[in-house]
Image: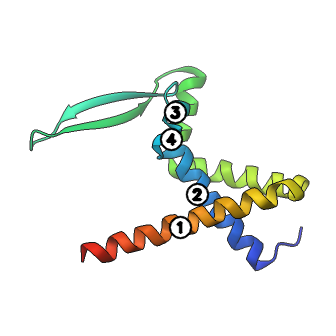
Amino acid sequence: MDISWIKFVLMSLAIFRVTRLIVFDKITAFIRAPFLMEYEETNLLGEKETYLVPREKGLRGWIGKLISCYWCTGIWVATAVFIFQWFFSFIVDPILIIFALAGMAAIFESIIQILIKD
């Protein structure tokens, strides 16, 4: 498979965005809920902090460990994007562009937030 540098960048941005969507975004919390348990603790300042911890046993625990790890999820998302791109590029290309644009927007927003704080 010959991947142009533009396709590589698009795939990378899309993988970044989909991985964040699975691991962090509130909109996909319902997907994570069966695999992660929520714990609340009060920190030294008296503020409540919420932690998500993978379930302890079985398939749900294994999936919980997978989706709580950004790096692990990124590998599986990258594998899926690559395979779907290989076999179904005519379907994947528009979706890839949408997620790549969303990924780039997320990166720009993060940079802007850093610049605003300084």
Residue 38 in which image quadrant = top left
- Residue drawn at (90%, 53%), measured in percent from left and top? 87
Image position of 64 with respect to 78: above or below: above
Reading the image, the residue beneath label 3 is 32
Disc 1 versus disc 2: distance between alpha carbons?
Answer: 10 Å
Residue 46 position by quadrant: top left
Amino acid tagged 3:
Arg
- Mark 4 lies on a secondary structure that is helix
Looking at the rendered structure, the kind of residue marked 4 is: Ile
Q: Which residue is mark 4?
A: 27
Rate crowding at label 1 as few (under 14), some (14 to 19) or many (20 or more) other CA atoms within 10 Å.
some
Q: CA distance from mark 3 to mark 1?
A: 24 Å
Label 2 Cα neighbours within 10 Å, binned few <14 / some 14-19 / many ≥20: many
**To which residue does mark 1 refer?**
105
Whether the residues at callouts 3 and 4 have beta carbons within 8 Å, the answer is no
Which label's residue is closer to the chain start, 2 or 3?
2
Q: CA distance from mark 1 to mark 4?
A: 17 Å
| Residue for badge 2 | 17
How far, Cα to Cα, is label 3 from label 4?
A: 10 Å
* Mark closest to the chain's N terminus, 1 or 4: 4
Task: Classify residue 88 as left or right of residue 109.
Answer: right
**Other residues around mark 3 within 10 Å, as few (<14) / some (14–19) / many (≥20):** many
Q: Secondary structure at mark 3?
A: helix
Sequence order check: which comes first, mark 3 or mark 4? 4
Q: Residue 62: image x %, image y %?
A: 57, 30
Which badge, 2 or 4, is on the more N-terminal residue?
A: 2
Q: For label 4, count other residues whose C-alpha is less than 10 Å away and answer few (under 14), some (14-19) or many (20+).
A: few
Q: Say if 63 sits above or below 23 in the image.
A: above
